Image: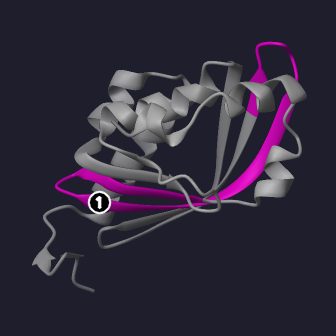
Amino acid sequence: MSRRNHGLESPMSNEEHRAVVTKMWDALTVMDWETLKSCLTEDIHYEDVPTEDPGARDPENVVKRLRIAFDHLGDHKHVVHHMVCEGDVVFLDHTEEWTFKSGEQVSHQFCTLHEMRDGKISRWSDYWDVSSFVGQFPKWFLEEMAKSSAADFSG
């Protein structure tokens, strides 16, 4: 099967795409923001598909958006159940386990679609069940999240 990138031949193999995506998720797990940003294109679009906000564009804003939640975590575990790479698309079926600094724990399964361009992630779309995941959050965390808006990571 031909590797395609917006109508152009992709120079990256499935294994190389897998390595970049794995590097990005490993960086997220340890909250290594510089390494995470190095895996993203300058025009990256990161979105939580089931939410109403427009997501974040560019690596700095992606990190701002992630840190709204991750700055409250003491630990983050990431378990990949399946990763499928085809051309410039990498699909993950995975579980994230969050431990808040205050001790509460939540666990939720996600499906994530990454599109690749020039060896980096250009699209990051997370699909998940809002009520199931958010329903696990401690009340104080929901109050913290409510203090943020799309304007905090869109400019």
Q: Position of residue 93 (x, y in %)?
A: 63, 61
Residue occupied by mark 1: 116
Q: Is residue 103 on the magenta stretch?
A: yes
- Whole-percent x, y for residue 51 in the image: 63, 56
Q: Quadrant of residue 101?
A: top right
**Quarter in which the C terminus is drawn:** top left
Q: Which residue occupies 69% across, 21% down?
A: 73
Which quadrant holds residue 3?
A: bottom left
Residue 113 is left or right of residue 93, and the answer is left
Q: Amino acid at mark 1?
A: Met
The N terminus: image quadrant: bottom left
Q: Position of residue 19 (x, y in %)?
A: 36, 48
Q: Is residue 87 magenta?
A: no
What is the number of callouts on the image? 1
Residue shown at the point (58%, 27%) measured from the top left: 68
Local packing at callout 1 (Cα closer than 10 Å; few below 14, some 14-19, many 20+) is many
Q: Is residue 134 above or below residue 138?
A: below
- Tell me if residue 19 can be seen: no
In the image shown, does 53 or 36 lie closer to the viewer? Answer: 53
Q: Residue at x 70, y 21 (%)?
A: 75
Residue range of the region highlighted in magenta in the rendering: 98-126
User: Is the residue 32 above or below the residue 151 in the image?
Assistant: above
